[in-house]
Amino acid sequence: QVQLVESGGGLVQAGGSLRLSCAVSGSRFSIDAMGWYRQAPGNQRDLVATIASAGRTNYADSVKGRFTISRDNAKNTVYLQMNSLKSEDTAVYFCNAVTIGPFGIASNYWGQGTQVTVSS
């Protein structure tokens, strides 16, 4: 059973910083892409940032220059450093991991979500 456990959310003032972590356990197969998505009330779940196993990153335009995604492959953990937070960053943040199994079959897993609230 693959599990993703997120931590690091909370309440912060605008301009502040938070660091999210997500540890993946229980996978028998290699973890390919990892990433963070967010969902504000009444909105769809949107991509924040992704990182490939070799380290290539991709960011939403709204967070470029403020957020940094990184990963520790030895620990199967992905991080999201969020700086210069804005009220519009308020959302539930979800961790995502894609594993590659036999015959190249990809499986997609999600964490339970962690709330990030930025007060203005």
Image (spheres, rainbow, N blue to C red):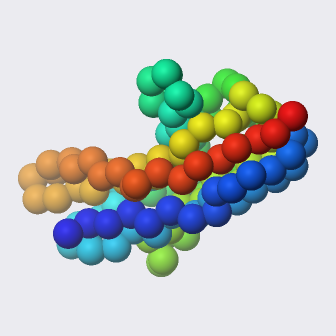
Q: Is residue 92 left or right of residue 33?
A: right
Q: Quadrant of residue 57?
A: top right
Task: Classify the position of the N terminus by image quarter.
Answer: bottom left
Placement of the C terminus among the 4 image quadrants: top right
Q: Residue at x 17, y 59 (%)?
A: 101
| Left or right, 88 with reference to 12 | left
Relative to 80, residue 23 above or below: below
Residue at left offset 16%, top offset 50%: 104
- Nearer to me, 83 or 15: 15
- The image shows residue 53 at horizontal and vertical percentages of 45, 57
> Horizontal and vertical percent for residue 33?
41, 50
Of the pair 36 and 100, the residue shown nearer to us? 36
Q: Is residue 84 visible?
A: no
Residue 17 is situated, as x and y percent measured from the top left of the image, at 82, 52
Left or right side of 110 for 78:
right
Can you see residue 14?
yes
Q: How many marks?
A: 0
From what the image shows, is residue 12 above or below residue 78?
A: above
Q: Residue at x 26, y 66 (%)?
A: 2
Residue ranking furthest to the left: 103
Residue 29, given in percent of the width and then of the height, sits at 23, 67
Q: Residue furthest right?
A: 15
Measuring 69% from the left and 56% from the top, which residue is drawn there?
10
Q: Is residue 17 above or below residue 3?
A: above
